[in-house]
Image (cartoon, grey):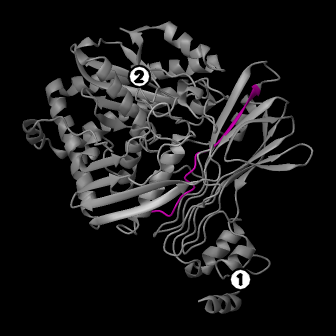
Amino acid sequence: MMAAETLSSQNVAGVRAESTAVDAVTLEILSNRLLSVAEEMGAVLIRTAYSTNIKERRDCSTAVFDAGGQMIAQAEQIPMHLGSLLGSVTATLEKHPRETLHPGDMFIANDPYSGGGTHLPDIAVVTPVFVDDSVVGFVASIAHHADVGGKVPGSTSGDAVSVFQEGLRIPLVKLCDRGELIKDVIDFIALNSRTPAEREGDLAAQIAANRVGARRLSEVVARYGIERYGVILAALLDYAETMMRAGIARLKPGRYTFTDYLDDDGINLGQPVPIRVTVTIDADSAHVDFEGSSPQVSGPINVPINGTLATVFYCFKALVGPDIPSNQGIYRALTVVAPERSIVNCQSPAPVGERIDTCQRVADAFFGAMAAAAPERVLAASNSSVTTATFSGTHPDTGNFYVYLETIAGGSGAHARGDGLSGVQVHMTNTSNLAVEALEREYPLLIDRYQLRIDSGGAGRHRGGLGIRRDIRVLHDGVVFSGLADRQKIAPWGINDGLAGMTGRYLLWRSDGSETRLSSKASDIRLKAEDVISVQTPGSGGYGSPLDRDPLAVLHDVVEGKVSLDAACELYGVVVTSDLSAVDEDHTRELRDTRC
């Protein structure tokens, strides 16, 4: 058993005591200054990136760290990336002590077992920041690169059984030396990608973002002076800890357990994979134990420990304090235990390409457990699947190889205060959709249909959010499709008598009219011109009995195409007139009285 304890403060008692003298205005100003550094880095990265996955879908993150490697600000981008960023900065300090660093140095890594990453497409770039020849912190960027080699285009394969099949592994190595780019490193990465120009362009964008971040952070530190900055920073970490502890103290003390399941691991089909979470609330601290979760599996849904820690960080921040500054002080109130060689603390060479779906299930299991402690705050199960569609081939107009990768959103769970959201990314991911116009301009693909899935949101007093249907037609022969998803067998559950949402699916419609339902982890599906892949994402669970839903809200859902006439009658006990103009109140009252 491994106790993966969160990184606690390195401040001595004297510094912590001194930090209490920092006034609230100064604290708030510095917190927002640091956040602005991270956000400006993100803006630079997005605006200068080459690939659609970063410049359009914003699958990237940026963060600021102190001189000891503690995260002190993260832009509101992709929560999952926190695990890789934490690990990469820690790996930098372990391999390159501060006294060996120089202004202009940069380091690069993606390996989950040596570089601190969580899967290979996420490449992190770390830069030390100097003021007066002293290291005062680090800035880091991470971006999901559309292809880093591996057995399939897009790198992440649903049938991978080893990390060696998932792409190029980059240990923590120097990318820039005193401001000079080490071009050999870029060349090595580009040579191992099917889309080398994209890799060069996206890495250049990360380097630019880090240079901007380093300049801005040095300006912030110089504004306060190194010593004063350190005192305020210590206070900021203390403040986040205090807020987290206060939030936890408002929860009902006790021990709460919940088990949720992934459909399968992509190799052992039809065998559900359990994720068991036990949360113990004790005064103002919390202990999270994953004992009882699956051992690490053959397929690519294993999670390195950094990814699990990032998920727990997100869950508690979402539950008790969305307004808490996003820094590592939060971790001081939490401890995490994850069995070694388990699916949430895997060891090399376990494949990890689809680790985010497991982290999504960790989040659902966490909120399922906490429903008994804070029922007014938790969501029913969300779509909680990063439903991915990857198309690749040689562009018939340019002769260049392309990789189009997108994750399609779904439903967000209903809750005590209202309906879930429809067509959104949830929990550990936060990417944008790729606009139809941008997709069709850059790739030889056509979107036939893009809409919400009727009846996919779980029925309840508050309805679950709806999933999405996106039908993608290929326009030339030789296209290869790979899909990665979950919740295509095990539905997103409801709360307090709310019903489950609809599961997702991949459908293949051949040009000859035949239809095939694909596996949730489908790889190397060969397509011809006019074949269509229909990506249909899960909805989410409802909250409360459907018979308690306001009939006018049901009517509104029917008019908007979110609930069918049949579902309105069968699930909600609401009869809508044939012209969709009103609720038939007499028949509705009779129907509901009979069912109650």
Circle on res. 52: none
Q: Which residue is drawn at 21% across and 14% down?
A: 132
Q: Nearer the viewer, residue 76 or 102?
A: 102
Residue bearing mark 2: 210
Taking 462 as reference, is 309 above or below it? above
Instruction: Bin the neighbour count of mark 2 within 10 Å (Cα to Cα): few under 14, some 14-19, many 20 and up.
Output: many
- The amino acid type of the residue labelled 1 equals Val
Residue 195 lies, in percent from the top left, at 65, 20
Residue bearing mark 1: 575
Q: Which residue is drawn at 68% across and 41% down?
A: 483
Left or right of residue 108: residue 484: right
Q: Nearer the viewer, residue 278 or 189?
A: 278
Residue 147 lies, in percent from the top left, at 61, 26
- The amino acid type of the residue labelled 2 equals Asn
| Magenta residue check for 332 | no
| Magenta residue check for 386 | yes
Q: Quadrant of residue 347?
A: top left
Q: Which of 348 and 212 is in front in this view?
A: 348
Q: Which residue is drawn at 74% across and 19% down?
A: 400
In which quadrant is the C terminus drawn? bottom right
Taking 85 as reference, is 204 above or below it? above
Residue 117 lies, in percent from the top left, at 44, 31
Residue 75 in sight here: no
Instruction: Bin the neighbour count of mark 1 within 10 Å (Cα to Cα): few under 14, some 14-19, many 20 and up.
Output: many
Q: Mark 1 and mark 2 in contact (Cβ < 8 Å)?
A: no
Q: What stretch is highlighted in magenta?
A: 378-393
* Cα gap from disc 2 to disc 1, whole angstroms: 58 Å
Assign a secondary structure to mark 2: helix
Q: In which quarter of the image is residue 307?
A: top left
Q: Nearer the viewer, residue 401 or 208?
A: 401
